[in-house]
Amino acid sequence: MFSVEGTGKTIEKAIENALLELKAPREDVDIKIISEGGIFKKAKVVVSISEDALPKYEKHKKFVEEEKSQTEDQIETAKEEKKEEKEKEKEEKKAVKEKEKIKKKENKEEEKQLKEEKTSKYCDPKEFLTDLFEILGKDVEITTLEDEKYITYMVNGENLGDVIGHRGEGYYSLNTLLKQVSIKNEKKILLDVGSFREKRVESLTETAKRLANKVAKTGRFIKLDPMNPSDRRIIHTALQDDNRVTTLSKGSEPNRQVIIFPKGDE
């Protein structure tokens, strides 16, 4: 049996690609769906010349060649061969039915596996990032840093500005998505794309310390502009060991703000 594996963005596109390679019409093939595809992977099918169609293609050619080459002495032999072919066809049809039973069983198992995969919400963070940046057409290197509290995935490469976005909107959205789809872990997941987080930590830490000095000097609290959870965490971490001030977050998302108080004035 001749078969070709086809891939595409959709099941129909995968079938079309396989038919072109196999050079056969759709009515003469069997189609087996391997994967329906999704956001991060392509659909995959296996297209095969059916057992019923294969003899049809070969039979006509064989018949013409036999008619040209046969002599009177070969006629009886040809009859016997045709008789054997009929017997063979019967056996092949029987084999096809057995294969169809096996195929139905395999399809049920595959459907069960696909269902289980769909119900699985989480994935490996590094695999998720690798697939995502491949879809985006970005050639990146992903490294992992791990300490007692955090696992940081560092993505480095060229032309990552459009992924980070204006003021980091793309970065923060990707960071949130990564946490939602990642395998649950006792350690918190951090993401750094093109050193954006590293630079952001440096900038906000400097700002936090400057404002803390001002609060300690004036004795008045300072309320910062609304920030996302990641930036607020940087401010809190930067001042957690400062014995002159304390910090807290107040308000509802997306307008939640960090407030820096003199120590004891909370």
Image (spheres, rainbow, N blue to C red):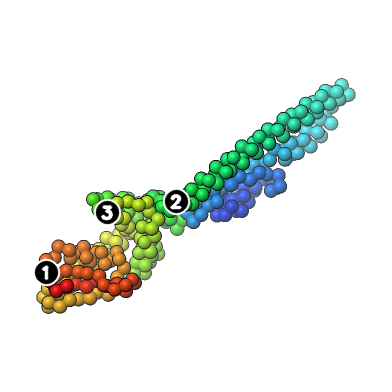
What's the residue at 77%, 35% (across, down)?
59
Q: Please name the amino acid that badge 1 sits on.
A: Arg
Using the image, determine if residue 207 lies above or below residue 24.
Answer: below
Cα gap from disc 1 to disc 2, whole angstroms: 48 Å
Instruction: Provide residue 109's location: percent of width, then percent of height.
Output: 55, 42
Determine crowd level at label 3: few under 14, some 14-19, many 20+ residues with C-alpha closer than 10 A: some
Say what secondary structure mark 2 lies in: loop
Instruction: Provide residue 242's location: percent of width, then percent of height.
Output: 13, 65
Outermost residue toward the right in this view: 72
First of labels 3, 1 by sequence position = 3
Q: Nearer the viewer, residue 106 or 195?
A: 106
Determine crowd level at label 1: few under 14, some 14-19, many 20+ residues with C-alpha closer than 10 A: some
Judged left or right of residue 46, residue 92 is right
Disc number placed over residue 244 in the picture, else none: 1
Quarter containing the C terminus: bottom left
Q: Which residue is mark 3?
A: 150
